[in-house]
Amino acid sequence: MDEQFKLFPAAASSAVTSSSVSTRPHLDEFFAKVDPVRNRLIFAIDATASRQPTWDRAAKLTAQMFDAAAAIGGLDIQLVLFRGAAECVASRWLSDARSLTAIMSGVMCRSGETQIGKILIHARKENERKRVAALVLISDACEELPTILYTEARRLGDVPVLLFQEGNDERVGEIYAEIAGVTGGAVAKFDLGAAGRLEDLLKAVAAFAAGGVKALAAQNSEAATLLLTQLKKRDSPCRSSAQTTGCANAAARRC
C-alpha cells in the first residue's frame, strides 16, 4: 500500500449536542461567510494494470478540477483507488490540487479485477457521515455481478454517480448506464485518442460538485451539456420508479 493511501476512521462524534449550540440565523450567516461550507467529491479510479497510460494523464488533469471548482466556491476531494488482488484504499479529504496530484503521481497500477462494489459502499458510508455531492468513477471494465452493484447503487440515496468509461465495451457501458440511471447520475465515454474529452468531463464534474446544476450549465461546453442532459432527470418520476424496481434503463426509455 502506498504510504499516503490509508483508510481513515470516521471522526469521533462531538460531545456537544445540537440542543446546546446556538442556531441564531445571523450567526449562521456570519460563519458561512467566514468559513463557507465546501462540497465534497469522491474521485474513484480503477488502478488496475490496463489503466496505467490513462492514470498518468488523469493525474495531470486533477489540478484543473480544483481550478474549475475554486472559481465557484471550492471543493474537497477524496481520492479512492482499487488495484491488485483486493486493494481498495482512500486518501484523506484534500482541498488543494498539489496534494492530490502528488498522491496520484506516486501510484503504480497493478493487475487485478474491478472493485466497484467496494467504491459504492465506501461512498454511502462517507455520505452518511457528511454529505457527498457526487461520486466519480473512471474505469474501463466491470468484472463484478451487475445485480449486486445495482443494489449498492440504490442504497446511495442522494449521491449521483458519474461514470467515465475508457473504451467502448458494450457490456461495461450498459452496466455503467444502469448505475448512473439508478443514482440519477451520468455516464460518458473517452479514450486516449481524445484526452481533451476527459479534461472537459472532469472540469464539468468539478463545476457540478461545487455549484450544482446551475454551475454546470454555465460551463457551456459539450461535456457539460452531455452531463447536464442526464442529470436533469434526477428529479423525474421515472428515476423514482427506477430506484424502486432496479430497471433504470427501461424507465429512462419511457421518459
Image: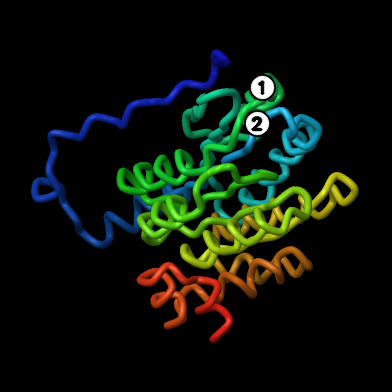
Looking at the image, which residue is at 50% across and 79% down? 251
10 Å crowding of disc 2: few (<14), some (14-19), many (20+): many
Q: Which structural element holds mark 1?
A: loop
Using the image as rendered, state which of residue 114 and residue 22 is in the foreground: 114
| Quarter occupied by the C terminus | bottom right
212 in relation to 119, above or below: below
In the rendered structure, the answer to whether residue 92 lies left or right of residue 68 reads: left
85 in relation to 232, above or below: above
Query: What amino acid is labelled 1 in the image?
Result: Val
Using the image as rendered, state which of residue 210 and residue 45 is in the foreground: 45
The mark nearer the N terminus, 2 or 1, is 2
Residue marked by disc 2 = 47
Looking at the image, which residue is at 77% across and 66% down? 221
41 in relation to 222, above or below: above
Q: Are marks 2 and 1 in contact (CB under 8 Å)?
A: yes
| Quarter occupied by the N terminus | top right
Residue marked by disc 1 = 107
Q: Position of residue 142 (x, y in %)?
A: 60, 45
182 in relation to 241, above or below: above
